[in-house]
């Protein structure tokens, strides 16, 4: 039981944490709600954390059934998820840094300031900014490793522990993103965003290559 618990928890945390990228995602969310108060950000952090937990839980639990129903193989899912992640990382790498360009991007992407934060918490702040298509596809893929013979207590506890750790990271990053941004400054924040964008792009390419390798191997 302890072995199943450890393996499941580590697999989910190491597989999903780089894709979710809570630090980089928190900075992106913060850029879309620049005039919120500390209390509003705290409430929003809770909402985004809960929404992320539900999305990840459904993806993990229903992953195997969804793939079976639609006849989608794991390599194909990895190729699709890798493409999505790589494109997202590339777009972040190419995002202009100058103030005028940033203002234009924010003008297009920032939700209506007159709408409530509660309405924005799920879309677009949780989905697709915090937990996007890449995270969902990886969660579905990881969900297919669940025991075939039935529910295993170690596996269930491992999934629960992994989700708690991931969601705790999401909450902490969302809650203190403003403080970290002030501490890093404008230049430091841009550097961190570029680094996370590069990591995201590399993760996407790695996932894409893994899926392609499996597909090419199956052809031979």
Image: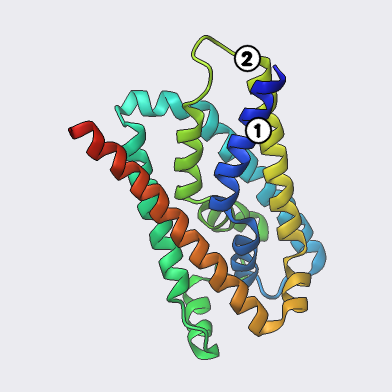
107 left or right of 23 in image: left
Residue at screen point 77% across, 64% down: 176
Residue at screen point 55% across, 42% down: 15
Q: Earlier along the polypeptide chain: callout 2 or callout 1?
A: 1
Tell me where residue 28 sits by quadrant. Answer: bottom right
Tell me where residue 114 sits by quadrant. Answer: bottom right
* Coordinates of residue 154 in the picture (x, y in percent): 68, 19
Assign a secondary structure to mark 2.
loop
* Coordinates of residue 104 in the picture (x, y in percent): 48, 83
What mark, if any, has residue 9 been given in the picture?
A: 1
What mark, if any, has residue 152 been given in the picture?
A: 2
Q: Is residue 110 above or below residue 185?
A: above
Q: Nearer the viewer, residue 163 or 217?
A: 217
Outermost residue to the top = 149
Outermost residue to the right = 39
Disc tally is 2
- Please report contact status of discs 2 and 1: CB closer than 8 Å, yes or no: no
**Quadrant holding the C terminus:** top left
Marks 2 and 1 sit apart, C-alpha to C-alpha, by 13 Å
53 left or right of 199 in image: right
* Coordinates of residue 86 in the picture (x, y in percent): 40, 59
127 left or right of 9 in image: left
Residue at screen point 38% across, 61% down: 87
Q: Is residue 177 above or below residue 141?
A: below
Q: Nearer the viewer, residue 128 or 97?
A: 97
Assign a secondary structure to mark 1.
helix
């Amino acid at each position: 039981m302890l072995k199943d618990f450890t393996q499941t928890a580590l697999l989910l945390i190491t597989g999903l944490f780089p894709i979710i990228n809570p630090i980089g995602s928190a900075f992106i969310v913060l850029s879309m709600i620049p005039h919120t108060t500390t209390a509003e950000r705290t409430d929003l952090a809770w909402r985004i954390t809960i929404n992320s937990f539900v999305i990840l839980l459904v993806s993990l639990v229903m992953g195997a059934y969804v793939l079976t129903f639609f006849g989608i193989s794991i390599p194909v899912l990895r190729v699709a998820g890798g493409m999505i992640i790589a494109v997202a990382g590339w777009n972040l790498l190419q995002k202009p840094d100058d103030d005028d360009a940033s203002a234009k991007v924010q003008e297009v992407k920032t939700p209506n300031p007159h709408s409530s934060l509660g309405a924005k918490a799920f879309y677009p702040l949780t989905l697709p900014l915090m937990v996007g298509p890449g995270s969902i596809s990886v969660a579905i893929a990881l969900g297919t490793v669940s025991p075939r013979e039935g529910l295993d207590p170690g596996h269930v506890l491992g999934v629960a522990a992994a989700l708690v750790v991931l969601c705790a990271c999401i909450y902490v990053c969302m809650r203190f993103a403003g403080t970290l941004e002030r501490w890093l400054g404008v230049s430091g924040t841009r550097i961190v965003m570029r680094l996370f964008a590069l990591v995201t792009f590399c993760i996407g390419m790695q996932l894409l290559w893994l899926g392609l390798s499996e597909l090419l191997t199956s052809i031979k």
